[in-house]
Image: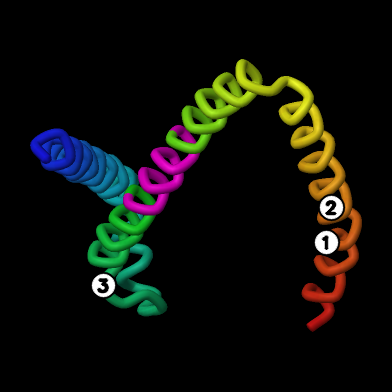
Amino acid sequence: TPITVLYKFYREKFAVQWRSWMTQRLLSNFEKDRSYYVLESSGDIDNPDQRIAEDANTFTSVSLAFTITLLTSVIDLASFSTILYSIYPELFGAILLYAGFGTGCTLFIGSKLVGLNFEQ
């Protein structure tokens, strides 16, 4: 599966380059206007440069995974919807109604759960 290997290689390469760029940008903002001196003198935060690097790593990895998952899902939805509609248009319509009804019920029930979760 050379395609899978190339996909993973370029995905990781992009992640490393994005993380490097973001870390450099965050560190340059951190060093601007001597903000590092203010943080060091207050003593509230230990190893801010390490935290910046870890936060950049977490942000880029989660954002990249979310973006690729979203893009893959949209492509799958479009391709399978086209195939299903070409085979059986009535079933496609029924599935859309069913999904819309389920989404509406989830939003109705879930809106009340958000308040309950916030009160906990």
Count of marks overlaid on the render: 3
* Residue linked to disc 2: 107
As drawn, is 17 to the left or to the right of 37? left
Residue in view at x 25 percent, y 39 percent: 18
Amino acid at circle 3:
Asn
Position of the C terminus by quadrant: bottom right
The mark lying in front, picked from 3 and 2, is: 2
Within-10-Å neighbours for mark 1: few <14, some 14–19, many 20+: few
Q: Element under label 2?
A: helix
Disc number placed over residue 85 in the picture, else none:
none
Q: Element under label 3?
A: loop
Q: Find the magenta span and give its range.
A: 61-71
To which quarter of the image does residue 43 belong? bottom left
Disc number placed over residue 110 in the picture, else none:
1
Q: Position of residue 11 (x, y in %)?
A: 22, 40
Earlier residue among tags 3 and 2: 3
Q: Does 69 appear in magenta? A: yes
